Amino acid sequence: MLTIIFCVFVVVVILQLFYYLGIFGKFAFAKPQTVTPKRLPVSIMVCAKNDAEKVKTLIPLLISQNYPDFELVLIDNASSDDTLDIFEEFEKQYPNIRLVKVENNEAFWGNKKYALTLGIKAASKAYLLFIDAHCYPTSADWLTNMASQFTMSKTIIIGYSAYEKVKGSFLNKIIRYDALVMATQRFAWAKLGMPFSGDGRNMAYKKEEFFSRNGYISHMNIRTGEDALFINDAATKKNTAICFTPESFTYSEARTTFKAWAEDKHKLLHTASFFKAFDKLQLKAFIFLQVAFFVLAIVLAAFLYNWMFLVPVIVIRYIAGWITMAQSAKRLNEKDTVYWFPVMEIILIFTQLYVYTTNIFSKKVHWK
């Protein structure tokens, strides 16, 4: 029986090596990107709801981008604080700011997808670059770097949105490592020609992509996932590129409690449940293999299986995973998150199990 379990364990490790080296490696070991500036007309899209303090800082950073042809589309999603007043003050100062005021609609009460749709319709430029009101770009060349990846055929660009580092916070490292893993998955599958998701805190696409698919109509009733679900629907091998130059990153504050972070992961899991069948399968397969590896390793160790066979398999698996994620972390300026790779991995596995389990036994009505 132990021999059979060990054989299954070896198969699990081989499949994990395929994930780490064969799939994640497509991004982790990719050559650094080069940037050839373009002069495409771009609308930067910012949708905000009760984000007065954040937009005060964000708008000056966006309006000062080093780019020859862009406008800033500010969408106030029925805010009850001073967000709209701040938007109006900036609109008076800069001619390339376009303001969209969204009033609550009975059919789309508080729905961000509805607000974004109005903003996209109002945008006058052919290309759209999205950033969240809670984020900020790393440099004045953010727009230049993201727009540089557009070509005649590449009309969807997936970027990286990171979290700020908090010194002395282990939870912050876990959250940033989790973001690193998710970004590695998105970038790697995109490089393999099978893009499946994007992050609305940093992504771009040609305006005609939105209208050719009737916008968010296929998932308008789902309260989350305006970015991920649109990319899952619209992105293909032919029309999608990634951007991972350091100047193209955006940053935002990470959650400061496990409960808040877990809630975010609940929403991401709920959104992913509406992905295409293959995309759901590959995401679940990766988590299943992670869990199976630890369960089988514990069982074999508990029953004192021959360490001369067991230990080398475990070591090979960890070396491959560690090297791959370290290389990916280097690409995305998250090197400190992989110093404790085995520990991070175990914590994420238990967190994923917790999220999956609680999602089964709870109904998040406000996400629908």
Image (spheres, rainbow, N blue to C red):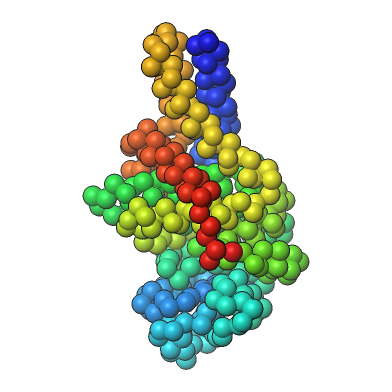
The front one of 316 and 156 is: 316
What's the residue at 64%, 67% (across, down)?
A: 221
Q: Position of residue 199 (x, y in %)?
A: 54, 58
Task: Farthest residue to the bottom: give it.
Answer: 92
Check the image and report above or below for 223 versus 331.
below
Residue 33 percent across, percent down from the top left: 53, 49
40 in relation to 361, above or below: below
* Residue 95 % position (x, y): 52, 87
The reply to whether residue 135 is visible in this rendering is yes
296 vs 109, left or right, is left
What residue do we see at 52% from left, 24% from top? 13
Q: Is residue 130 above or below residue 321?
A: below
Q: Residue furthest right?
A: 212
Q: Is residue 319 above or below residue 267?
A: above
Residue ID at (45%, 71%): 133
Position of 361 compared to 205: left or right? left
State the image coordinates of residue 110 (x, y, percent, origin top left). Answer: 54, 76
- Residue that protrudes farthest toward the front in the picture: 361
- Is 222 or 73 nearer to us in this picture? 222
Task: Locate residue 294: give its quadrant.
Answer: top left
Which residue is drawn at the image coordinates 43% and 66% (left, top)? 135
Q: Nearer the viewer, residue 354 or 224?
A: 354
Image quarter hosting the C terminus: bottom right
On the question of residue 317 being in view, the answer is no
* Front position in the image: 9 or 16: 9
Q: Seen in the image, is 224 located left or right of residue 167?
A: right
